[in-house]
Image (cartoon, rainbow, N blue to C red):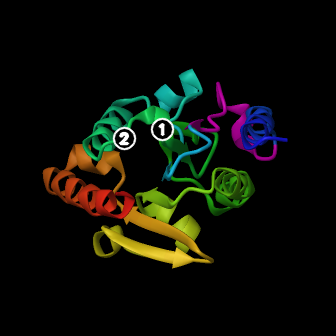
Amino acid sequence: MTRKKQLEALHDVIRNCTLCPLHKTRINAVPGEGSVDSEVMFIGEAPGASEDETGRPFVGRSGEFLTSMIQEIGFSRDNVFITSILKSRPPRNRTPTQAEINTCRPYLEQQIEIINPKVVVLLGGVAITSLLGPRKVSEAHGQFHEIDDRKYFMTYHPAAALRFPKVKNRMREDFQVLKQELV
């Protein structure tokens, strides 16, 4: 089976997942989207209202900002892969529980394995902590971390950048560091 077919099959499983109670309150599961051949994979926290409605990741205001940041470093949404730790929206956009993270993590690990990106970009505290362990974004942003020959890059979540001008500037600087790694 090709990697593309593997990813499509996995996304079908995710769309029909009932492993945690979030399936009862979601409109659509949001597996993620982008190129199976991507050098870079972006991972956020969880789908929001716009993502839940469309079944697509990062399509609201945070998504618009993330898309512009991706374009600033010479990529497009079509040639990266974008997903989240959780594949279903938590009610009222609350922070994901550890049980929800643990339930979705195998899906995410399979996506990373299939796509095999050069760099996995973790957007915000939930993504960073879920995959690398507890870290403060304010101290970890702009840094790479390697585990099992997999390179992770830590930065802020686009939603934080939209709320705080200083964070927006730091995120822009972080993306320039990321760009140097991908050139």
Name which quarter of the figure residue 77 lies in. Answer: top left
Q: Is residue 34 left or right of residue 64?
A: right
For the residues bearing labels 2 and 1, Cβ distance under 8 angstroms:
yes
> Looking at the picture, how far across and down is residue 37, in whole percent?
59, 44
Quadrant location of the N terminus in the rendered image: top right
> Looking at the picture, how far across and down is residue 12, in whole percent?
78, 32
Identified at 20% across, 59% down, the residue is 173
Q: Residue furthest front?
A: 183
For the stretch drawn in magenta, the main secondary structure is loop
Identified at 64% across, 38% down, the residue is 31
Q: Residue furthest right?
A: 1
Q: Secondary structure at mark 1?
A: helix
Residue 79: give its label.
Answer: 1
Identified at 30% across, 68% down, the residue is 142
Residue 75: give its label.
Answer: 2
Quadrant location of the C terminus in the rendered image: bottom left
When the figure is inspected, residue 54 is found, relative to residue 15, above or below; the finding is above
- Badge 1 amino acid: Asn
When the figure is inspected, residue 70 is found, relative to residue 54, above or below; the finding is below
Identify the magenta region: 19-34
Between the residue at mark 2 and the residue at mark 1, the CA separation in whole angstroms equals 7 Å
Q: Residue furthest top?
A: 54
